Image: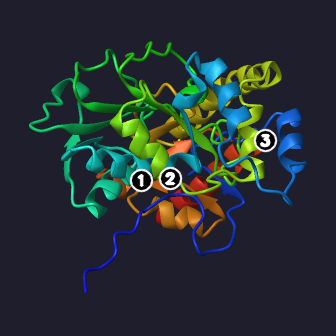
Amino acid sequence: MTPPLLPEHGGPDDGPPAAHDFSTNASPLGPPPALLSAVQQADRQAYPDPQYGALRRLLGRAEGVEAGLILPTAGGAEGIRRLTLAALQTGHREVWVPQPGFGDYALAALALGLAVRPYADAGLIRPEAPALVWICEPCNPTGASLAAWPELDGHLVVIDGAYEPLRLQGEALPPPRTAWRMACPNKALGLTGVRAGYLVAPAADAAWAQALSLAPSWVLSAEGVALLSHWHDADTAAWLAEARARLREWTAAQRALLAALDWPEQRPSDTNFWLARPPRPDIAPRLRERGIRVRDAASFGLSGWVRVSAQPPGSQAALQQALLEIESEDA
């Protein structure tokens, strides 16, 4: 029997809850009060509109496109699976994925028998056949940004903007008009348990028709509709601006903390998460024993590295204490 292809993620595992979770790249500051209240008060006793007409019109106005070009998704992972299948059905045979990058891009392609082409530099993408190209901007797990969009006319290019609302420095590049865009607001809102996002198609073409046709009925729950309905509110934008300001402070403090504990390298990042190389290869399991979680980056092809995210001062103090204990044990 062919073994199943299973994704590997950070975050929750089958152990006890972590008291301090540095493995997640979601915002630790949570959602704006008004948005959270709307999610909590969502009508769970009734189906949402199966066509999501009002929601798509609202999001279309915010994105500057026709409502029909908005495709609600049950989070980014569902959008990746659905659009990969739509790409296959419209003649695309290669899938280009960032390396290191989110594993679901490649996994969705492999599950459908598509050729996977990893790339470390978007400027070196050279499809030999009609291709689906994933660009995560800023990228997970690195937090790095592109200097320029690659020229990929004639291919199905998708910009995963899940971490754009968590950009702490630099400015977003205006997206190419021919590219798809994918929005996953729940990370920036600290509501990753609410699976809600949307795709923005550049045109009502064959790929759009397939992606729309492949959506499950009621792909969004009532809570998901509530979240997306308040995503572009002025209150939400103000809350996110304040969150980014605080995350900049926490990021600077946490980088300084790790540097003082002789972590040999921390890579640059434009976001609230970054890659770091600890002084000991077994740091992730030893921290986990102390109720602290970091993201082992081996599954990204980065053995010996971890991904960490900025967390509140209390969590940083717990991390410092745990690392000092481990250093003392090994002395």
Can you name the residue that lies furthest to the left here? 128
Q: Amino acid at mark 1?
A: Arg
For image coordinates 26% across by 59% down, the residue present is: 110
Amino acid bearing label 2: Glu
* Badge 3 amino acid: Ala
Disc tally is: 3
Number of other residues with Cα within 10 Å of mark 3, as a class: few under 14, some 14 to 19, many 20 or more = many
Q: Return the residue nearer the eye: 8 or 287.
A: 8
Query: Residue drawn 58% across and 65% down?
Result: 288
Per the image, the residue denoted by label 1 is: 81
Residue wearing tag 3: 226
Q: Quadrant of the N terminus?
A: bottom left
| Above or below: residue 191 compared with residue 173 | below
The residue positioned 57% from the left and 54% from the top of the image is: 323
- Does dot 3 land on a helix, a strand or a loop? helix
Label 2: few (<14), some (14–19) or many (≥20) C-alpha neighbours in 10 Å = many
Whether tag 1 and tag 2 are in contact, CB under 8 A, the answer is: yes
**Image x and y of residue 126, in percent:** 13, 31
Marks 1 and 3 sit apart, C-alpha to C-alpha, by 23 Å
First reached walking from the N terminus: tag 1 or tag 3:
1
In the displayed structure image, the side of residue 73 where residue 237 appears, left or right? right
Q: Secondary structure at mark 2?
A: helix
Tags 1 and 3 touching, CB below 8 Å: no
Task: Tell me which corner region of the image, top left, top right, bottom left or bottom right, holds residue 108.
Answer: bottom left
Q: Disc 1 to disc 2, how far (Cα)? A: 5 Å
Q: Is residue 97 above or below residue 13?
A: above
Q: In the image shown, does 184 or 325 lie closer to the viewer? A: 184
Q: Please give the name of the residue rendered at 59% of the width and 29% of the height, measured from the top-left corner.
A: 166
Q: Is residue 311 left or right of residue 255?
A: right
Q: CA distance from mark 2 to mark 3?
A: 18 Å
Residue 91 image position (x, y, % from top left): 21, 44
Q: Which residue is mark 2?
A: 78
